[in-house]
Amino acid sequence: MANVELMPKLGMTMTSGKITKWLKKEGDKVEQGEPLLEIETDKVTMEEEATYSGVLLKILAKEGETVPVNQPIAIIGQQGENVDDLLKQSNIIEEQKEPQQNEPIEETKKPISQGEQTSIPTKPRATPVARKIAKEYDIDLTQIKGSGPSGRIQRKDVEEYLKNLQQRKLPTQEEPKSKPVSYTRTIPLTGMRGIIASKMKQSVNTAPHYYVTMDINMEEVLKLRETLSEKVQNAKISINTFIIKAVALAIKKYPIINSFVDNDQIILKDQINIGLAVALEEGLIVPVIREADKKGLSEIAYEERQLIEKAREGKLTPDEYNGGSFTISNLGMFDVTTFTAIINQPEVAILAVGKIIPTPVVEDGEIKIKPMMKATLSSDHRVIDGAVAAKFLKKIKEILEDPIKLML
């Protein structure tokens, strides 16, 4: 008996997935648990295994399509099995993935009279999503050939037209011929890059940012790190390990930092989940260490290392990079001394950490060289006042300059 493969829910917050590649083609044999396709969810791409054994009779969602969770994507059954009845029972139709907005279907208008040379311009048939994309990019739908029922234009038709247009784009007629525009290549603002663009735009437009910066003496942290590294065998303790723990303890002192805005309410979270920004070739991802305030340095270090490795290999699950309550972004390894970061929505603050550099400081009336690090806190002024931000950052500074507090 044939069975329907559904778009899996790979994380608590996942609502849809984009099919990037089918690892099997129609007619291939499939074993339960065997990799069947690759799915892009939010910021990562993962292989998904087949739920059933048999023959891949029908692929219902093509590569590049975004499908809501629990919606049919394929049918697996026995060779030669008729899937028509199953298609009807499952109400699987070509347009099931397009959001329905009760848009009336336009009918082709007849010419005014047979004697006229032209007819009244007709409005091409298209799905609501196709119209939305076309309007956003100022695309004439009459130039697109639809692949849907009765030639109806679908989202994929518009996206393909846009892709081809960008590749062969030429100067407009209004541009002087003496100044031709050269287009070498285009990079679609989709996938991880598109998500980052959307979230950063939302953050800047929603949260009024302001910044406070402090210099932190990391001398004692470096000493403690060297001591612990000799004793901890299962994990390499990094500077980020100390910062994660210090931030988690500081949040316990100032719980307003551990919140988010929901309409006209500020919601305080129960768990202190610290995200660490990891740079990838295609963008940025923030794996989360949950309940960091309750974990020791060695446990944080081990979990941190595992998450970073999975992030770089593209193997993070949605639950491993969602649910954070505060983010740390460290660019010190790139020789950056100081910078400001955009808040990772829906969080209300983010800590930007620079490189530790030998710096002359005055101590007991003498000039000494100390390993100093600049830390800049970006805060959402809707939630966090300047004094609170300063106190919170000062608490982090106090803990890192006396890191024995991290062991208590």
Image (tube, helix red, strand yellow):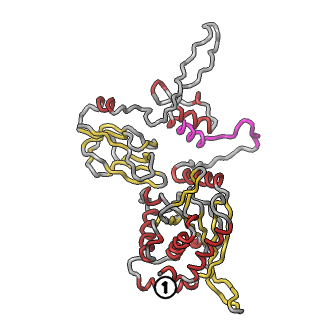
Residue 161 shown in magenta: yes
User: Which residue appears at 68% of the width and 63% of the height?
Assistant: 210
Q: Is residue 28 left or right of residue 205?
A: left
User: Which residue appears at 64% of the width and 63% of the height?
Assistant: 384
Query: Residue 123: where, in percent of width, then height?
Result: 59, 24
Query: Residue 141: where, in percent of width, then height?
Result: 58, 30
User: In this view, which residue lies farthest toward the front?
Assistant: 265
Task: Name the amino acid type tagged 1.
Answer: Glu
Residue 39 shown in magenta: no
Q: Which residues are magenta?
A: 158-178
Q: How many marks?
A: 1
Residue at disc 1, secondary structure: helix
Query: Residue 56: where, in percent of width, then height?
Result: 30, 41
For the residue carrying disc 1, how many other residues have a C-alpha within 10 Å: few (<14), some (14-19), or many (20+)?
Answer: few
In the image, 6 versus 404, the foreground residue is 404
User: From what the image shows, is residue 260 above or below residue 178?
Assistant: below
Quadrant in the picture for the N terminus: top left
User: Which residue appears at 58% of the width and 65% of the height?
Assistant: 257
Query: Residue 227: where, in percent of width, then height?
Result: 47, 86
User: From what the image shows, is residue 33 above or below residue 164?
Assistant: below
Q: Is residue 36 left or right of residue 317?
A: left
Residue assigned mark 1: 226
User: Which residue appears at 28% of the width and 40% of the height?
Assistant: 76
User: From what the image shows, is residue 385 above or below residue 105?
Assistant: below
Asked which quadrant contains residue 86, the reply is top left
